[in-house]
Image (spheres, rainbow, N blue to C red):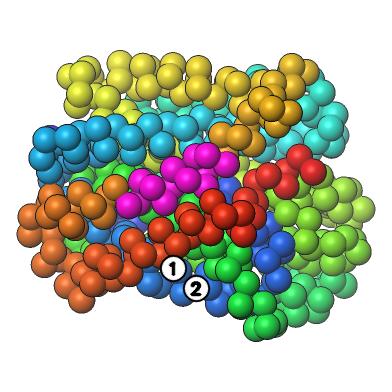
């Protein structure tokens, strides 16, 4: 039983927006958009936000608030056998967190390089042990926040960090829109080439991106919902969270594409953008260092609040299952994340740990990011909608019920099928190319 509560409605909204806005918006969104035809991509993206992400957000928050417990106990309460599904969802979160912290570590390393007067390339950075050291550092930081608890750790961090993230995004976007590449960037972002809408890969990429970006279907919002007071309106809150997430992604596009076009670089490079292309462009532009420090700084802050939300899912489940206090549960969960994440961290270090010729991080990203995400969402729908696991939660869904019951599972199956058939392009993979 969750006894902790958010201190206020703004505190809850900042924490959930902090969970949603992360590497997914600022780094992955521009990369996926760039490799999927620019503005055309916004059509399936916005459809996915409205038709899939918002109803699922409402469902998760409603289930969490009604059951007031962690994701594993919530599943266990549905009936015999469902506990396993709960652990599977928590395991997926653990896997995502394990490599998310490695990526966050890289951001930390790049921030350090630019802030101390230097700069670094991805090749030079990963030739040494710094990526592993940075992984350890951010893991400890995230664990420290979670161990402080819902109000004093998670909410307090989000209250400081999220306004800063949005201010930095808006400030850097405003400056970058004075660069010569502005018109090309705006045209690329907002002129949809509708002819590419027939490509199933585009749809699959957009839906995958939305699940990743909004943190839905992973038990994160369920866990955060268990700390929510009874009076907060769920549909309105979910719309605010989704709007903030979309705004962050679009602002990130306005930050990144003017720089890319000004430097005469290609916008379709994918995820290497943040660590290879952008630093090069920052180096060549006026006030480039200030922009670089602001960019990596905001990326780090956004990633930290997301990593905190992922760890909280596991800690809440572990604390309940073992009856350990928050501190000890956090220590245990963090040790597990560390062990799981080490192979990913080592795959971009002098060890170059690889399986079948591919860096471990890429493999984990592909299995966790591409398959575990939709599968987790399906488990949630199966337990709490089809099997009726949360009882009266149906009433809270209202008109959204048919969407959650039929449309979303169909979309999830279609998107996963498209990936299995190889029509989708997993964006993270481009990191190494
Ligand atoms: N939504 C967050 C982001 O965009 C983190 C996250 C990723 C959460 C994947 C769940 C799954 O970075």
SS category of the residue bearing label 2: helix
Q: Quick one: label 1, few (<14), some, or many (20+) residues within 10 Å?
A: many
The residue shown at (58%, 20%) is 342
Secondary structure mostly seen in magenta is: helix
Residue 271 visible in the displayed image: yes
Q: Is residue 206 above or below residue 387?
A: below
SS category of the residue bearing label 1: helix
Residue 427 place in picture, x, y as percent: 65, 51
Q: Quick one: label 2, few (<14), some, or many (20+) residues within 10 Å?
A: some
The residue identified by callout 1 is: 49
Magenta segment = 366-378
Q: Is mark 2 within 8 Å of ligand 1?
A: no
For residue 411, which quarter of the picture?
bottom left
The residue shown at (68%, 57%) is 31
Q: Which mark is residue 111?
A: none
Q: Which mark is residue 46?
A: 2
């Amino acid at each position: 039983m969750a006894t902790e509560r958010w201190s206020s409605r703004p505190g809850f909204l900042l924490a959930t927006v902090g969970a949603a806005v992360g590497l997914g918006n600022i780094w992955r969104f521009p990369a996926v958009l760039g490799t999927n035809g620019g503005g055309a991509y916004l059509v399936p993206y916005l459809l996915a936000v409205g038709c899939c992400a918002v109803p699922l957000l409402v469902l998760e928050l409603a289930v969490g608030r009604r059951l007031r417990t962690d994701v594993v106990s919530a599943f266990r309460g549905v009936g015999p056998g469902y506990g396993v599904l709960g652990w599977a969802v928590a395991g997926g979160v653990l896997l995502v967190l394990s490599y998310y912290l490695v990526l966050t570590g890289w951001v930390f390393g790049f921030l350090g390089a630019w802030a101390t007067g230097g700069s670094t390339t991805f090749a030079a950075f990963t030739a040494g042990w710094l990526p592993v050291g940075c992984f350890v550092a951010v893991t400890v930081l995230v664990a420290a926040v979670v161990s402080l608890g819902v109000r004093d750790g998670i909410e307090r961090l989000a209250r400081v960090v999220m306004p800063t993230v949005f201010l930095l995004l808006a400030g850097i976007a405003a400056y970058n829109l004075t660069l010569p590449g502005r018109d090309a960037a705006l045209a690329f972002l907002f002129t949809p080439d509708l002819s590419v809408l027939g490509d199933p890969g585009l749809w699959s990429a957009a839906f995958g991106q939305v699940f990743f970006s909004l943190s839905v279907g992973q038990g994160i919002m369920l866990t955060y919902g268990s700390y929510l007071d009874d009076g907060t309106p769920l549909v309105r809150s979910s719309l605010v969270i989704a709007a903030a997430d979309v705004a962050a992604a679009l602002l990130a596009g306005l930050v990144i594409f003017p720089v890319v076009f000004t430097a005469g670089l290609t916008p379709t490079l994918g995820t290497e953008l943040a660590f290879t292309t952008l630093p090069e462009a920052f180096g060549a532009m006026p006030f480039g260092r200030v922009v670089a420090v602001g960019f990596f700084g905001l990326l780090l802050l956004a990633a930290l609040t997301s990593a905190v939300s992922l760890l909280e899912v596991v800690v809440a489940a572990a604390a309940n299952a073992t009856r350990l206090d928050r501190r000890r549960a956090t220590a245990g969960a963090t040790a597990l994340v560390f062990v799981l994440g080490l192979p990913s961290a080592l795959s971009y270090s002098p060890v170059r740990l690889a399986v079948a010729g591919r860096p471990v991080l890429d493999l984990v990203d592909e299995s966790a990011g591409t398959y575990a995400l939709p599968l987790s969402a399906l488990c949630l729908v199966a337990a709490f909608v089809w099997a009726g696991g949360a009882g009266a939660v149906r009433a809270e869904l209202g008109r959204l019920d048919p969407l959650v019951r039929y449309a979303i599972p169909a979309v999830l199956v279609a998107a996963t099928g498209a990936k299995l058939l190889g029509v989708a392009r997993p964006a993270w993979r481009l990191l190494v190319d």
